[in-house]
Amino acid sequence: MERFSDGEMEAQQPYAYWLDGTEKISGAVKRKLLSLFGSPEEVCLAKKERLAPFLTDVQIQALKAGKARGEEYYRLSEEGIAFYPFYHPRYPERLSHIPDRPFGLYVKGRLPEEKKRSLAVVGARNCSEYGRYLAESFGRELAGAGVQIVSGFARGVDGLAQEAAVRAGGSSFGVLGCGVDICYPSSHGRLYVEILEKGGLLSSYPPKTPPLSFHFPPRNRIISGLADAVLVIEAREKSGTLITVDMALEQGREVYAVPGRITDRLSDGCNRLLRQGAGAALSPAQLLAELEQSVWRGMGGAVERDKTERGKEALSEEEAALLELLEVTPLSPDGIRLRMKESRTLRDISLPDTMELLLGLVLKGRIRQTGGFYVRI
Amino acid sequence: MFSSMYAGGIAGMKAYPVRVEVDISRGLPGFELVGSLGKEVREGKERVQIALKNAGFSLPVARITVNLSPADIQKEGTGYDLAIAAGLLACMGTIDPGSLAETAFLGELALDGEVRRVNGVLPVALAMREAGIRNLVVPAENAAEGESVSGIRVTGVENMKEFLTYLQAGPEERSRLFSERREGARQGGGAGGQEKRGTPDFSDVYGQESARRAAEIAAAGFHHLLLAGPPGAGKTMIASRMAGILPPLTDGERMEVASIYSIAGKLEERKAGSFTRPFVAPHHTVSPQGLAGGGRLPRPGMLSLAHRGILFLDEMAEFSSETLEVLRQPMEDKTVRIVRSRGSWTYPADFMLVGAMNPCPCGYYPDRNRCGCSDTQIRRYLSRISGPILDRIDIVAETAAVQLKDLRGGEKGESSAAVRKRVEEARQRQKLRFGNGPYRFNGELSGRDAERYCALGTGERRFLERVFEAGEMSLRAYHKVLKLARTIADLDGEETIGTRHLSEAVYYNGGRKQFWKGE
């Protein structure tokens, strides 16, 4: 297929949008038609007889029915949504080399930068406090080091990692299983706005496409496709996260996993991946160093130094001792006090005093209270 | 021939004297009962007629009219039989009505002349004393109930024979009748009696320090409490011990409670534990009417039976939302108002709510090895407790599963008596603070008054501002934290609220965040 000049490209956009939105035709067939007919306009306006050898009657009907949609193309920009068909110069370079790349990509916000490091962080939706802790710390530290965090904008690990990334001042990109104008899950309303400021939301589905369950697995190939490597934080033995890993391997991306306890069902997927030869991610710094040696070797521009290190308030002796007893898994005050009884410095502290110490640690940003439990941040 | 006797009527929680007027005159033979009567009252005509016949008194063939006055109040129940019988006997000249002018009757007659138990003897006795009536005749079974009221002589009769003996005796003789039985009854205790032995004690609870502390704070300041935790974490165990750490009922309170149970016909159940506060635990399938009270003849419901005590809702999320919404008005007004086409009734319902529930549908959140519930499922489950109800609950305490360590090496908990002592002291402090004002407990304080009575120093105010800025407390939780901190300081014996008290209050308020995520 010949290359278009800028003007022609713009003229072709409504037709490309029309063609892309035709659901009954697969991406591969669309690409084939395009190479045969020369341009989206030719495909969309072709006579039925010309299309007949390549498409069924139903598909032709579906294509013709999309005419009205083509005219709506100009509304996209009003909503701040950009549309890039695969031959578009702005279509992400990383995606153009993957098998079954999406025919078109809808973007709200901006696209990931080609020259910047990019890492996919994925994991379970119903993650544990351990997963939450990992998602947040990897998201925050890596984004702080200038890595673009790509994920699926889902509940749990995905959203937490992205949230931590944008809050640390980094950039993050969410790949949706619905139109980019829809905030799904709706509980991510705040993240939706934040991510648009610091990065972007992408989808291969046209705007207004509802989040249907079968839309999600195919988007996983875009998540791994947009990244240089994939980090799995928590996954059950059978999970959607592992689909992303399969895609990543197919696309030749490096896969890293965080090990977990073998008794934790939410770590089964990760431990299995490690057993199969995935890289072990033991800390953000180690992962970063390792990636610099492999995937990102020779990549221009030094990694921006972590700017997120906050001036942390000093802890009293008791607070420091108490912090030592806390974990990233939730502990009730009773559980904490059991540990305190075994410690020399904290043995004689009463329950009310314990709570004052704990709130002090919360206010100093070292731990967090979730419900009636405390976890380390 | 005309005569009039007194009987006791009950409307809602209030008893009042009813004049039973009997007239026997010549005319077309018949027996008419009038005066806004319910079905059971009208059927009394047959019971009285046959019981008298079987005792050897045939009614004369004449026109008999019985009027229950005041005639404009609806009368229900079977307690009027004795008064009607006495009135008839007086009209027939069998007994002398003159000596019965200050006597009231309450009781149901069986066809063989036996006198059967009725509900509400206690409030009737109180009302009769109020009205200046000095003698009350009741079924023997109910005698103890009435005898707990001083200032009125209560006599229990077992059957028509004893009833007649009483009626035919002279005024002097009457006071001595059946006195041996009275002695026996007194020992059994009506509204009196001894504290029941073997009530569950807090020392049976191992570990669970923070939940125990939550129970103590709730009891001290009359804060409604919600316990959340996995199965087997001791929620029910703690809740069922809470009545034991509340101060014993005062004399006045005991009468109130006994009156409610008397009207509900459940005084027998309470006999043994009359000094301890009621502990009412309805099953989660209870209907809104069962909870609030109601029925064709309204009766007090579970909320009123828990008056001055504890209403425990186990598996609170399993109650239907309609049932839970019933709690809203009583938790605010401390009374239940039932409106039916025939009138409205008000029952007292000054209870402390203790709820218990799982943190998620499967019960094990946040232990992700056992809990596979999605966030949406958890939120949907928790949202079964509506905002308005949750707004009235000051403490949400999460209990973690008890660890083997607690059971084995752990220290045995403090006894209920020790905790109760602190609770009583804290309550005493509140009494001094509130005097005779509208409030009795910190838990009852509303918005502005919370700020007035729970004043903070500058340092403490700044501390709370920091907590707010850190997102650990929402604005709507501000007053709750203040009230809780006030109670915790009271338990501590401190007049000023310190950061330590605030810290603890913030923790116990923190459980609520689980329910109102995103606010």
Image (cartoon, coloured by chain):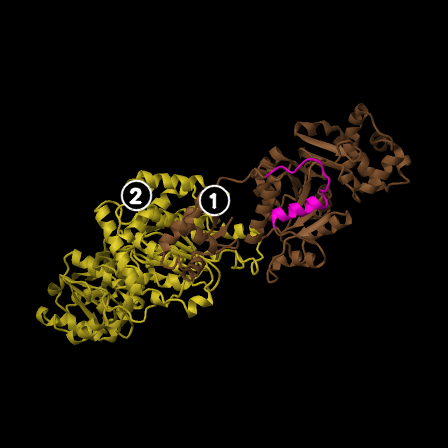
Picture residue at 65% right of the left edge, 48% below the top: A287
Q: Position of residue B205 (x, y in %)?
A: 38, 65
Vertical side of A359 occupied by B190: above or below: below
Relative side of A116 to B448, left or right = right
Front-most of B323 and B70?
Answer: B323
To the question of a shared chain for discs 2 and 1, the answer is no
Picture residue at 21% right of the left edge, 49% below the top: B432
Residue found at the very far left of the displayed protein: B172
Q: Quote the CA–CA distance across marks 2 and 1.
A: 28 Å
Q: Amino acid at mark 2?
A: Cys
Which residue has dot 2 on it? B454
Mark 1 crowdedness (10 Å alpha carbons): few <14, some 14-19, many ≥20? some
Chain letter behind tag 2: B
Relative side of A210 to B160, left or right = right
Relative side of B468 to A285, left or right = left
Q: Image quadrant of residue B300? A: bottom left
Q: Colour of chain A?
A: brown
Vertical side of B251 occupied by A57: above or below: above
**Magenta residue check for A304:** yes
Residue found at the very far top of the displayed protein: A7
